[in-house]
Amino acid sequence: MTDEIPHARPSPAPRPTRLWRWRRNPLRRPTDLVQAWIGLALTLAVLAATPLAMVLVGTIVHRSLQQTADEQAQSRHRTPAVLLHDAPRHPEPGSQEDRHTRYPVKVRFTDPTGHSRTTTTEVRPGLPAKSTVQVWTTDSGKIIDPPWTAEQIRSRTLGSAGVAGAGVLLAGALAYAAAARALDRRRLADWDKAWAQTAPRWTTST
């Protein structure tokens, strides 16, 4: 009767090394623990500062944009204007692109001072001549963009808040990278010093 060859046992799963700087072991250097504490401190600081920065910047930006929108609403006037000729038709009426396409067309309107003016503005495709559209004008009668809407203010505010949050995250990452680089230089210096003390004992005279 032949002996059976035992089945090979699977090698043990490797131990996780993500938190090795926190574990006591003979290979851990003091600078490793310092780097771990720096990483923890920066993580907590970033977690606390990110929402604070987003709220602070968002509040400031929203207040500024709302003030600008209020000033625009006071200095800009919604005015009816009449098309002087037909607007071009879009090749695909009713399509998604058709709903967003605008064509420049000459229009006539009366400015806030009572003077009749003729200028060019963008209108929806297919509007016939003598159709009435709404334009925004300044006190002097110049056509201008409408005041910012609440949705535009909200979008710009969220964008600014997002940039502020990303800035905090980037600052934390750069701070950790700078600290890690400084500690690496310290470790290399310690290694050179230790090697300078050990190397003579490895040297043999001939």
Image (cartoon, rainbow, N blue to C red):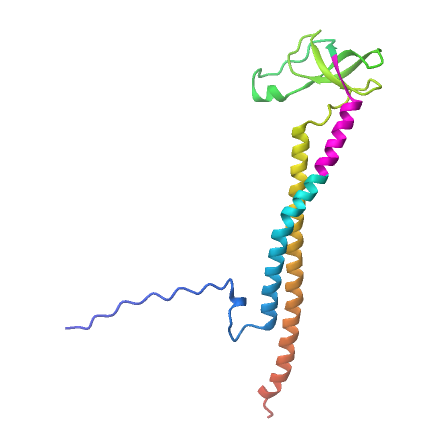
Rendering quarter of residue 183:
bottom right
The residue lying toward the viewer, choosing from 65 and 91, is 65
Give percent across and percent down for residue 8: 30, 67
In this rendering, the answer to whether 200 lies above or below 130 is below
| Magenta residues (range) | 61-80
Q: Which residue is drawn at the image coordinates 66% and 16% (left, top)?
A: 124
Asked if the magenta segment contains residue 189, the reply would be no
Q: Which residue is drawn at the image coordinates 56% and 19% (left, top)?
A: 95
Q: Which residue is drawn at the image coordinates 68% and 40% (left, top)?
A: 58
Residue at the farthest bottom position: 206
The residue lying toward the viewer, choosing from 150 and 19, is 150
Rendering quarter of residue 14:
bottom left
Give percent across and percent down for residue 173: 63, 55
Asked if the magenta segment contains residue 68, the reply would be yes
Q: Which residue is drawn at the image coordinates 63% and 84% (left, top)?
A: 197
Give percent across and percent down for residue 146: 73, 23
Rendering quarter of residue 82:
top right
Q: Quadrant of the N terminus?
A: bottom left
Q: Main secondary structure of the magenta part?
A: helix
